[in-house]
Image (spheres, rainbow, N blue to C red):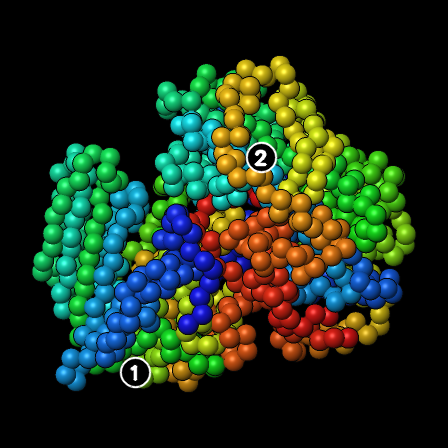
Amino acid sequence: MMHRGPVDDRLGIKYGAGGRAMRALIERVCLAGLGPSPVEGIGLSAMDDGAAIRVGDRWLVITTDSHVVHPIVFPGGDIGRLAVAGTVNDLAMMGATEPLALTCALVIEEGFARADLEAVYASIRAACEEAGATIVTGDTKVMGRGELDGIILNTAGVAFCDRVVPDSGLQPGDAIILTGTAGDHGMAIMAARHKLALEGDLRSDVAPINGLVRAALAAGGQAVVAMKDPTRGGVSSALHEMAEKGHVGIVVEEAAVRVRREVRAACDLLGIDPLLVANEGKALIGVRAGSADRVLAAVRAHPLGAEASIVARCIGEHAGAVILDTGFGRRMLAEPEGELLPRIC
Amino acid sequence: MTNAERDGGAAELKFRDPARARGLVEALVRRTAEIGRAPISVMHVCGSHEQAIAKFGLRSLFPKGLNVIMGPGCPVCITDTPEVDEGVVLARQGIRIATYGDMVRVPGTVMSLADARGAGAKIHVIYSAMQAVELARSTTDEVVFFATGFETTAVATAAVVLGGLPRNLSILSAHKYIPPVMEIVAEMPDTRVEGFLAAGHAATITGSAVFEPFVARHGRPVVVAGFEPLDILAGLVKLLELIRDRAPAVVNMFPRCVTRDGNRAAQQQLWKVFQPMGGRWRGIAHVPNGNLRLRDEYAAIDARRRHVIDLASLWDYAPPALAQSCICGNIMSGLASPTDCKLFGQECTPESPVGACMVSTEGACRIWHQYGGHPDLGGGA
Amino acid sequence: MCLGVPGRVLEVSGNVATVDFWGVRRQVQLDVIDEPVAPGDYILNHVGFAIRRIPESEIAETLALYEQIIAQAEQDDLMAGDVRSEIAASGGGDRDER
């Protein structure tokens, strides 16, 4: 797999941003350091949303995530909901929509308020109920004041499934469905974090979407060939990975991507492209062309998929590239460079 | 979702209509053909023009005989390394730095503000100059507003200064002034730029009259254009008409925001607080009157005079000789292309940029590096 | 330069206006604008400061100007109509070499 760029001696914030720098880090430091780790199934070197290991005639899917969002409470959710949804959704992206069990490990800063922690756990419980998931084990640590920023949650999830859907399965001619509006989570976080004083309903879309994915798989079966959730780095990052791993070009029809008007307005004001903004309750689903409409209908019938649309098609040319048809002309869609920042120019 | 919902204000202001855009593109094709030589090079001097051109995919619509060059119009990208270093040095002294998002990742000699933050500095990203004031009021720490941007943005800084600053706030001005650099490009020997698209928002402040002496001196037309797709296309059509007719003139194609005299109130505030001084722009060498610095009357709130900024403390290495090999100036004048530069793709990459053309996400070198030039994404006309 | 975004004034209080950007609202400073603004006016916002009141009449006039440019170009070439329908028929996204 071709990857880009050297890795710096000091690892700046861009290495966690979900884009090229992060993938370079994983490849050159993590994978290289761990050495070959062969597994019967999808292992570390695939750098997919999770791993899949053959157990008997089924697949055991495993994923893990650390959650460091700030502020820890934001419009639409909190770090607890994010932790559960993130892990459940990673499992779902691999095709495992019935979580078997989740773990939740906690690290808090000395002085963290008990009431705040209770609120986080209430969110975790509610999200688990929505997803049909259970936390079965965890860990608890407290670090000194100033040694970390508030709270970090780490979750892991396991599930069985009969068929694994990789993020590398795209072929020319396939259609790509985005299950809802783009940019909700990242803009809500940005507005809150930088105190941008924007009034309007900017709220995260954070939600477990395993039920939605289950509906898509039920409708499409083997015609669902690739899935990925557009979290950090937005739709752009996720599509770049899918294009690269599938060796296809992807043409996105910008007009087909739905954006809430509040998100559109905030993006215009701050000079940000909604396609580069994180989502936490959406999926990109790659489908063979003949089944696209059927899968789309199934997704739209689900409460979390009402705004779903076919946003892109795969082509044989420009393999690895993501092209945007703006309605005026076409351009290459860039990947975001590290964290998104408001710009003035 | 209706168009109004989708595009909000811009659709309400109707300047994103694809049908009209197609009509304007045809006009562009026709005018290019009428001029009868190729390529015709025109330059815009605004990062936001390039952002808009890129965002709407307009490049794939330009006729092949028309070369629309991105000039030195990104105020952050042309902020030279010593200026970035000033901000970094202050940040490492423990002073809180408030700055616009654009500035955070621009490389200095050793590091960017983002890198300094990684090493423990307190960098606050703000959207408006007022937030620097709010930040200073919320803390007893010293705060410096690292103020970047062209004259349009300097106006906001001036307003904030005139409103009175909290005691713990001072201004590090890296503001730039655009008209002088157009002179430099026009005066470059062998420059191929035949006309300029001027930035509509800066002209909202300065007025279109500010370009009249330039046109008289250099005999090249200037069209002031807005930033919606129709504005840019219509501006280019008008510019080509002026080139075709050999009519050097200033034409205002953005009358909804720009008048001949501009915003006098804003100008007064701007020149009350700032004076133009010469300085080096990244990749462009010396630009007389290209920098805006605080007047002596404001020495008390000038970060350069309030704080000791010892750049040598950052320079364990010799200042980069690389900068001397950078040919951004020639690229911006249409005399060279990125692949003519010996640093391109080697010492100068998006991850470690040397010149402005690689710093800017829409700079010629950056685009070449990422996409191998301008790939043919649907055929040019 | 730079990111200037139009918005519509909702209310004015001293030298601060509350402006609607068709989805979000924000306070905008009026320190540098050169004429008074009232609710209903359109302004051009740059980094939280209004730098210009956008007169509605200019909007219509500018659109008319662009129409004129298009019409002028069409007049110069009798084939314009055919070319246009070719483009429309091919879906609008392709630009063939002429």
Residue at (50% x, 21% y) in the render = B307
Percent x, y of residue C27: 47, 33
Q: Nearer the viewer, residue B343 or A49?
A: B343
What SS does tag 2 mark?
helix
Label 2 marks a residue whose chain is B
**Which amino acid, mark 1?**
Gly
Quarter of the figure that contains the C terminus of chain B: bottom right
The disc placed on residue B82 is 2
- Left or right: residue B271 compared with residue A217: right
**Which amino acid, mark 2?**
Pro
Percent x, y of residue B8: 52, 51
Q: Quadrant of residue B116?
A: top left
Residue at (54% x, 74% y) in the render = A318
Percent x, y of residue A96: 22, 73
- Left or right: residue A127 compared with residue A242: left
The disc placed on residue B228 is none
- Left or right: residue B255 compared with residue A345: right
Residue tagged by mark 1? A221
